Image: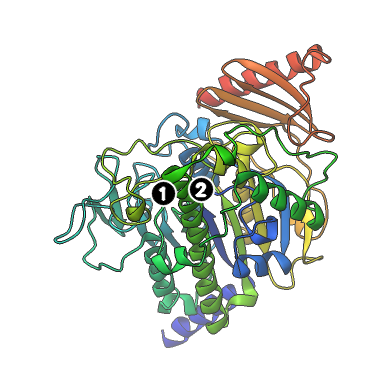
Amino acid sequence: MKFIFLSFFIFLNLFSAEKPNIVFILVDDMGYSDLGCYGSEISTPNIDSLAQNGLRYTQMYNTSKCFPSRACLLTGVYAQQSGMDKKHAAMLNAVTLGEVLKTAGYRTLAAGKHHGTENLYERGFDHYYGLRDGASNMWNPGKQRSGEATPGNKGRTRYWCDDEKTIPNYTPEDRNFHVTDAFTHKALEWLDEKELDSQPFFLYLSYTAPHYPLHAWPEDIAKQKGKYDRGYEVIQNERYNRMVEMGIIDPHKSPLAKWPGKNWTQNKGIELEKEKRRMEIYAAMIEQLDHNVGKVISKLKALGKYKNTLIMFASDNGACSEGSGAKTQSTKLEDFGTVASYETVGKSWASVQNTPLRNWKNYSHEGGIRTPFIVHWPGKISSPGTFNREPVHFIDIMSTYVELTAATYPTDVTPMQGTSLLPTFKGKEIKRSKSLFWQWQRGGAIRDKNWKAVFWNKNWELFDMSKDQNEAHDLASQYPEKLQAMKKSYHAWYKEAKQK
C-alpha cells in the first residue's frame, strides 16, 4: 500500500513536469494602444517585458462586449451557441476551460470578474473569488460603510463569489480594499497551496479594470498629473507615431481613423479639468494593473514555476465610449477617483485609447473587437519580441489548451469552434478552415481571410483588410456580389448558432 501511494505521487510529479502551468490575464474595456508595448505613454513595464520576451498579436479578436467575450474565452464556442449573446446568463451546452483542463490533471483557479449568473466554482474551478457581475464600485462593491461617502453605483445588487459562497452586495471591512489588488492577492494565496507541488495549474486572472468607474489610488493618480494637459489630438498622434515606429501598424494600411469627438480646445474651465483628471485616473488604473501583473510574475519566479508557465494577456473588448448610467455618484472634481464617484472616460478619450482603430466597445468594427494579445512562454516562442499578424479569436484559446495539455473535450456539447494557436508560437501559420463571426446588439461582422463585411443598424459595409485595417474605404458598391455572398454566410452561421 505504501508503495502504491508513493508511486502515485511520483506519477503526479512527472505529470506536473511535463505539462506547463497556464495563466490567462484578461482586462476589461482596455483600448488597443493602451500598453507601452502597443504604443502608449502609460508605463506598463511588467506587461511590456512579457511582450519583449514573447509574441505580440496585431489581430486578436474578442466580441466587442464583456460577457460574450468572457463566454467565448471560457468555452471555445461563440456566445450565440452558449446562450451568452443577449444578456449575462448561464453558459449552456458548453464546457469551461476549468472543466476541460481538470481532465488533464490541472488545478483550476479563477480570480476576478465573470459577468454571468453562475459561480465559476460550480463550473470546473477549484477556487473562484471575484465579481460575478459586470462592474462595481472598485473601492466598495456593496453598501455604504460607517463614516464613508455613499458609494457611486448603478443602484442594483452586485454579486460576489468566494468559492461556494455567493454574496449579494459584498461590503469589505478593509478600507484599503480595491478590487484589482484583491483579485491578485487571492491568486497569490492560491499559488502557495500544497496541491501545486504535484499538479500543474491554470489561473484565470480576470480583472475589472480599467472598466468604469474610474477608481485608482491617489498616489497613482498623482503620478499622471499634467501628462494629459496637451489634449486628445496630441496624445493620439504621439501614440500613432510610436505604433508605426514599433511596427505594430503600417501607416499605409492603418491611417488614423477620422476624429469623431469634440476638439480639445472646446473644453473650458471645470470641464477641462475634469477631462484631464478622467484620463489621469484611467492611466493610473492601467499602471496599477501592470503592478499587479508584476506581482504574479515575481511570485512565479519565487516558486520556480516561471519558466514552465504559459502566460497570455488580452482585453475583453475595445475602449468604452459610453456613459456609466450611475444612479448615485458625486460629480465634484475633488471626488473623482474616490468611492463616491462613478466616472467614465467618454468618447474622445476612448478614441485615443483605441488608436488608430474605428469605433469602440459594442461595435463590430475594429475598435470594438480588436485587442492587444501577448503570449509569453520561456523557451517555447521561436522568435521572442516579434509580431504575429494573422486574424485570431478568443474561440481559439480552448483549442490551443486542449492540444497543449492533451485534455479531453466532451462530445455531448457544442464542438470547439476555434483553431489551435500553437503553430504561431513557432512562427507558422494556422490552418483556419472557417470564417470568423461577430454579433452583438445592433452590429455584427464576418471575416473571411482578408475580406470583412460589417454592419451597424442593418447598414452593411465591405472592407479589404489587407489594404484597409481601419475600415476607411467601403467597397460594398464596388463588389456587391462579394458582399452578398458574405452576408449569406453570416446569416447561415447566425441561424445555426441560435439553434444550439
Residue 243, image x and y in percent?
75, 53
Mark 2 belongs to which amino acid? Leu
Q: Residues within 10 Å of mark 1 (few under 14, many from 20)?
A: many
Q: Report if residue 254 is visible in the image.
A: yes
Instruction: Say which residue label 1 marks.
Output: 114
In this picture, residue 86 sits left or right of residue 308: left
Residue 349, image x and y in percent?
55, 44
**Picture quarter with the N terminus:** bottom left
Residue 6, image x and y in percent?
47, 85
Residue farthest to the left, as pictured: 146
User: Judging from the image, what secondary structure is the residue with disc 1 in?
Assistant: loop
Residue at point 21%, 66% (across, down): 173
Residue at mark 2 to residue at mark 1: CA–CA distance: 10 Å
Give the mark nearest the N terminus, 2 or 1: 2
Towards the viewer: 438 or 287: 287
Residue 135, image x and y in percent?
37, 46
Q: Report if residue 19 is visible in the image.
A: no
Q: Residue 482, which numbered label?
A: none
Query: How was this image coloured?
Result: rainbow
User: Judging from the image, what secondary structure is the residue with disc 2 in?
Assistant: helix
Towards the viewer: 257 or 182: 257
Closer mark to the observer between disc 2 and disc 1: 1
Q: Are marks 2 and 1 in contact (CB under 8 Å)?
A: no
Residue at point 57%, 34% (across, down): 262
Residue at point 70%, 42% (across, down): 356
Instruction: Say which residue label 2 marks.
Output: 74
Image position of 332 with respect to 89: above or below: below
